[in-house]
Amino acid sequence: MSTDKQGTKLLARTFFNQLRASGYTPMQIIGVATELLDLVTEDIKGVDKNVGQPTQEARPDFRQGA
């Protein structure tokens, strides 16, 4: 597994564990994940349409395929 995938997996697991420790139910966590996906989708749509969003080059921390 690449370093990027390991980091992403660790971040997701940490976030999940923090949500569970805070009392979130599995269904609530699915809701959070859905909201995150919606935000990413909207961000990608904005970038694709060049609606004043920074390009990939302007966001060096953006890792494609991470």
Image (cartoon, rainbow, N blue to C red):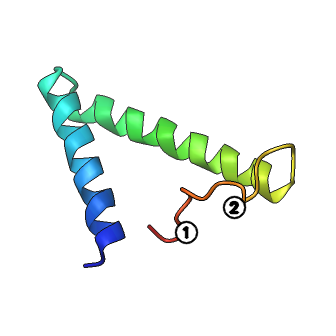
For image coordinates 50% across by 36% down, the residue present is 35
Residue occupying the point 68% across, 46% down:
43
In this rendering, position of residue 31 left or right of residue 43: left
- Residue 7: give x, y in percent of width and height: 29, 60
Label 1 vs 2, first from the N-terminus: 2
Residue visible at 49% across and 40% down?
A: 36
Which residue lies under the disc numbered 2? 56
How far apart marks 1 and 2 lie (CA) works out to 9 Å
For label 2, the crowd category at 10 Å Cα-Cα, with few meaning under 14, some 14 to 19 and many 20 or more, is few
Q: In this view, does 33 lie above or below 22?
A: below
* Residue to which mark 1 is pinned: 64
Which corner quadrant of the image does residue 64 belong to?
bottom right
Quadrant placement of the C terminus? bottom left
- Return the residue nearer the eye: 26 or 62: 62
Along the line of sight, which residue is nearer the eye, 25 or 42? 42
Tell whether label 2 touches label 1 (CB within 8 Å): yes
Amino acid type of the residue tagged 1 in the rendering: Gln
The residue located at (65%, 54%) in the rendering is: 59
Image x and y of residue 33, in percent? 40, 41
SS at mark 2? Answer: loop
The image quarter containing residue 9 is bottom left
